[in-house]
Image (spheres, rainbow, N blue to C red):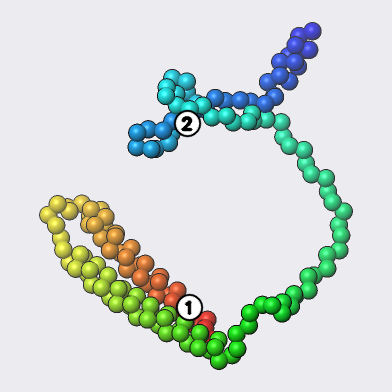
Amino acid sequence: MRLLMLFVLLFGMSGPVRADIWECVDSSGNKRFTNLKAESAGCKPMNLPPISSVPAPKPQAQPQTKTVPAKPQATPGSFPKVDAPTQQQRDAERRKILEQELGNEQKLLDQARKELAEQEAIRLGSERNYQRVLDRLEPFQKKVALHESNIANLRKELGSLR
């Protein structure tokens, strides 16, 4: 009898679980979620489906079938085509734009390096702890790294042009 009651109790506990969750929005528009009834004053209850603790059934194994590689599809006849001189002109314009962007990034990198060097030369009296110096220099170092990354990406893009 006790075993049967224990089994019924355990089986009843393994069913779907439901938690009451409330969504709270403050005067600034920030959202906060809580499951504590005491903190839910003025909050909107969320209607969430129950969560089941029972594992989902495993999918049945499908029989192995031989797959045939897909044939490359031909370009449809209605697809717009560009003649070779027009494409060469577009490629030349693209190269010109990328080279201009590369030049601009080089100038910005030089300027960022100059600003970083100026900041590295400055020692403030309030920076007795070296970590404060590192914290002050970090945005300047990030700016240099960003421009170096942009230059590397532009060079890569220019290298991949025809």
Residue 148 appears at what percent x and percent y? 37, 72
Residue under pointer 1: 156
Report the quarter where the C terminus lies: bottom right
- The answer to which image quadrant residue 53 occupies is top right
Neighbourhood count class around disc 2 (C-alpha, 10 Å): few under 14, some 14–19, many 20 upward? some
Towards the viewer: 15 or 31? 31
Residue 4 appears at what percent x and percent y? 78, 12
Residue under pointer 2: 23
Residue ranking furthest to the front: 78
In-image side of 3 versus 86 (left or right): right
* Disc 1 secondary structure class: helix
What amino acid does circle 1 point to?
A: Lys
Distance (Cα) linking label 2 and label 1:
47 Å
Residue 132 appears at what percent x and percent y? 23, 53
Res 39 seen here: no
What amino acid does circle 2 point to?
A: Glu
In-image side of 152 versus 80 (left or right): left
User: Residue at (87%, 60%) from the top-left corner?
Assistant: 65
Towards the viewer: 13 or 3? 13
Vertical placement of residue 145 versus 8, above or below: below
Res 82 seen here: yes
- The answer to which image quadrant residue 81 occupies is bottom right
User: Residue at (59%, 90%) from the top-left corner?
Assistant: 84
User: Residue at (76%, 9%) from the top-left corner?
Assistant: 2
